[in-house]
Amino acid sequence: MSTISEDTLKVAIQERLNALHVDITDMSGGCGQAFSVLIVSPDFAGKNSLKRHRLVNSALKDEIAAIHAWTAKCQTPQEWQKDNATGEPALNGTIHGRVEGTIA
């Protein structure tokens, strides 16, 4: 069983990526093997999506290696504020843990 938890991931993200906001969803039902994450950091400014994900993957390489599935949405504070001003943003295609477009 993985020693990675939502709490340990959040601390690592905040410390290593200068994150101002972190939303983590354990998509594995609590066993710590699949996470979907929204990371808001000023460190993403001026970087395209690929460079943002490379930065995250490099900063969290040990944690990512210890889990089965990982998805991250990386935003600057300005992008995150804009999304929040227009309503609740979907986190990697999900709303409240459900895949967007499903009824269940």
Image (spheres, helix red, strand yellow):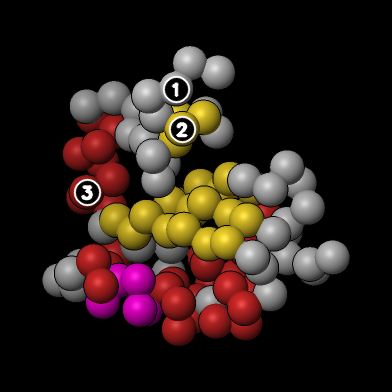
Q: Callout 2, which amino acid?
A: Val
Q: CA distance from mark 2 to mark 1?
A: 6 Å
Element type at mark 1: loop
Q: Position of residue 88 (x, y in %)?
A: 35, 28
The quadrant in which the C terminus is found is: top right
Q: Position of residue 44 (x, y in %)?
A: 27, 68
Tag 3: Cα neighbours inside 10 Å, few (<14), some, or many (≥20)?
some
Q: Position of residue 97 (x, y in %)?
A: 55, 33
The reply to whether callout 2 and callout 1 are in contact (CB within 8 Å) is yes
The reply to whether callout 1 and callout 3 are in contact (CB within 8 Å) is no
Span shown in magenta: 51-55
Tag 2: Cα neighbours inside 10 Å, few (<14), some, or many (≥20)?
some
**Residue 74 magenta:** no
Residue that protrudes farthest toward the left in the picture: 46
Nearer the N terminus, badge 3 or badge 2? 3
Instruction: Residue 79: give its label.
Output: 3
Q: Main secondary structure of the magenta part?
A: helix
Residue drawn at point x = 67 percent, y = 54 percent: 6
The quadrant in which the N terminus is found is: bottom right
Element type at mark 3: helix
Which residue is under mark 2?
Answer: 99
Instruction: Residue 102: give its label.
Output: 1
Closest to the observer: 10 or 102? Answer: 102
Nearer the N terminus, badge 1 or badge 3? 3
Q: Callout 1, which amino acid?
A: Thr
Occupied quadrant, residue 69: bottom right
Q: Is residue 31 above or below residue 56?
A: above
Q: CA distance from mark 3 to mark 2?
A: 22 Å
Q: CA distance from mark 1 to mark 3?
A: 26 Å
Occupied quadrant, residue 29: top right
Closest to the observer: 42 or 23? Answer: 23
Tag 1: Cα neighbours inside 10 Å, few (<14), some, or many (≥20)?
few
